[in-house]
Amino acid sequence: MKKKIGFFQSIDFKIVFVFIILLLVALELIGAYFIRQLETQLVDNFQEERRLQVGFLDNTLQPLLENDEDQNLTEEISRLLADFSGNGVLEAQVINPQHHILGTSDSTNQSIVGGNSNDRDVHQALLLSSKITNQYTDKTTNDRIWKLVSPIIANDGSNEVLGVISLKTNIESVYQQIEEITVIFLNASLLAVGLTILLALFISRAITKPITEMTHQAIQMAGGNYSGQVKIYGEDELGQLSLAINDLSIKVEEAQESTEAERRRLNSVLTHMTDGVIATDRRGKIVIINEMAMEMLNTSQEEAIGQSILKVLKKENEFTLRKLLKTEQELSFDFSTPETPLILHGGFSLIQRETGFISGIVCVLHDVTEQEKIERERRDFVSNVSHELRTPLTSMRSYLEALIDGAWKDPEIAPNFLQVTQEETDRMIRMISDLLNLSRMDAGNNALDMEYVNINELFNHVLNRFDMMIQSSDQPKKTFFIKREITNRQIWAEIDTDKMMQVFDNIMNNAIKYSPDGGTITCSLRETHDNVVISISDQGMGIPKKDLPHVFDRFYRVEKARARSMGGTGLGLAISKEVVQRHGGKIWANSSEGKGTTFYVLLPYIPYEEDDWE
Ligand code: ADP
């Protein structure tokens, strides 16, 4: 996010500030040197001029003063001094060695002529016979006064002091001139500062404007907007930087697009995977979870993201992340609910960078419920077969042992024992042939021998056989009455006659077996527009609700002992189901306990117009 830059932190301020400081330092140095130099020069010039003036007067006065007899000396001097004027000259006096004032240039002050001078500088000059200069400030006018007292030396080689010329000048004008120049200089400086500020602002703007635009572009890029381009103001370094940023923007956009495409691809792969995939960060918190995994774990994206993978897999009490990764085989997770079984296998692997830094974990979950079920069924099947074969064998063995032990001599018991042994053997043979049948069907190499059959006729034929069974036997074990509710229409369908008869036999046998003596068995055959539905209802004991879905399982019997005693193998319905399913049909049962059971067989058929056959 862009932070507002304070005025004092801005490049604009810094550049202007540095420029001004540099300019002021330069001006200060130049100004101080220049003004000092100028002052010395002007003051020197002024003084030199005065010295020349005094020297000139000296030259004029010297012969006059040497010649003492000159009566008109005072007038002469007064005339000379009256003409004595010049830049800033206040007063020029001529004083003799006796300190008498011989003349003054001040016309208003002629009264002092003839009087004594009590000027200290004059006294000193006379005494030392050398030039004395003195600068002081006039108390009344506050002007600076420069005074030159120059002795007049005799030219005859005696070096006698003939008098002094005392010149008082107002030097203030020189200083005023300097001040004026200083003011001009200051004004020029101020103007220079102003211009510098403008120039510095112009320069700093030339730098900051592209920078501001680049910053703006960088912020836009960070926000995912790559459409903008930085304006290029020149071919300097900033221009090149702008070019580089524009180039970068295009590159980042391309990279972003390819990452996005990659992400979408990954997403679609993950979404359409039949395995569940979960990816976590370093600390095991979920960052990616695909649809399948959510479905398997019965969770949602919102719920799962950010959660610990251990918690989601319900393993937080058994495992730590480290332990999870150390386990070499796949882990098994049981997510079964009372309604649906669900067994998952999970494989874990690390997401590692090239440096070896671990950045997360990937877990792949496979649904192995079906495999587990098949495996369990296989185990159950083997144990069932062994058990089922052992029971008749044990019973036969005990009968045979009894016979060996002498029972064979007993004409009463022996035939009975042998008959039981034969029955058990028959049952085993039946069971083994059933098993062989099933296993052939499982292997798929027991192809159906299909032919067009009138199901109506076939079903009636089966039922006739059962009717015959009661009528032919003198003392039937059980009596029953078959009630037929069968359509008169011919229903031609393509079926394997032998196998389908076996199915009807099985159901009919069961109906008789599990019904009380004298019960009615209602057999119906109906057709819908493309199905035939055969139903066989008995008035027997019925099948408890919880057992109903299992009666078609191999070796499943509701009451094991009873069913076995009735000679059942527990494979009849399993075979029937297999046969019906291979015909593309369905088999199911409805039952109410104590009242009876109805078995239904549905077979597909294509109805033919009777004309086709005539
Ligand atoms: P079995 O040879 O034992 O009859 P099936 O596969 O034919 O084996 O039947 C499986 C089980 O289903 C039987 O043991 C029995 O408990 C139950 N069963 C089948 N038909 C009926 C029925 N008509 N009435 C009640 N129970 C039945």
Image (cartoon, rainbow, N blue to C red):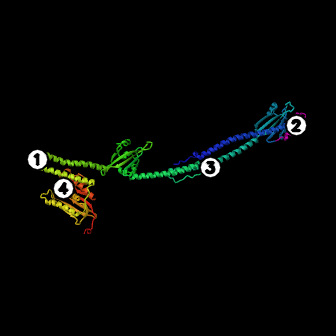
First reached walking from the N terminus: tag 4 or tag 3: 3
First reached walking from the N terminus: tag 1 or tag 3: 3
Q: Which residue is mark 2?
A: 74
In the image, 10: left or right of 137? left
Q: Quadrant of ligand 1?
A: bottom left
Magenta: predominant secondary structure element? Answer: helix
Q: Is residue 596 visible?
A: no
Please tell me how crowded label 4 is: few (under 14), some (14-19), or many (20+) other residues with Cα within 10 Å: some
| SS type, badge 3 | helix
Q: Please state which of the two labelled residues, at mark 1 or mark 2, is closer to the viewer.
A: 1
Question: What residue lies at 9% left-to-right and 49% top-to-bottom?
Answer: 412
- At label 1, the amino acid type is Trp
Q: Which residue is mark 4?
A: 513
Q: Are marks 1 and 2 in contact (CB under 8 Å)?
A: no
Residue 178 locus on image (x, y percent)? 73, 42
The yes-or-no answer for disc 3 within 8 Å of ligand 1 is no
Determine which of the numbered discs, if any, sits on residue 560 in the image: none
The yes-or-no answer for disc 4 within 8 Å of ligand 1 is yes
| SS type, badge 4 | helix
Q: Are marks 2 and 3 in contact (CB under 8 Å)?
A: no
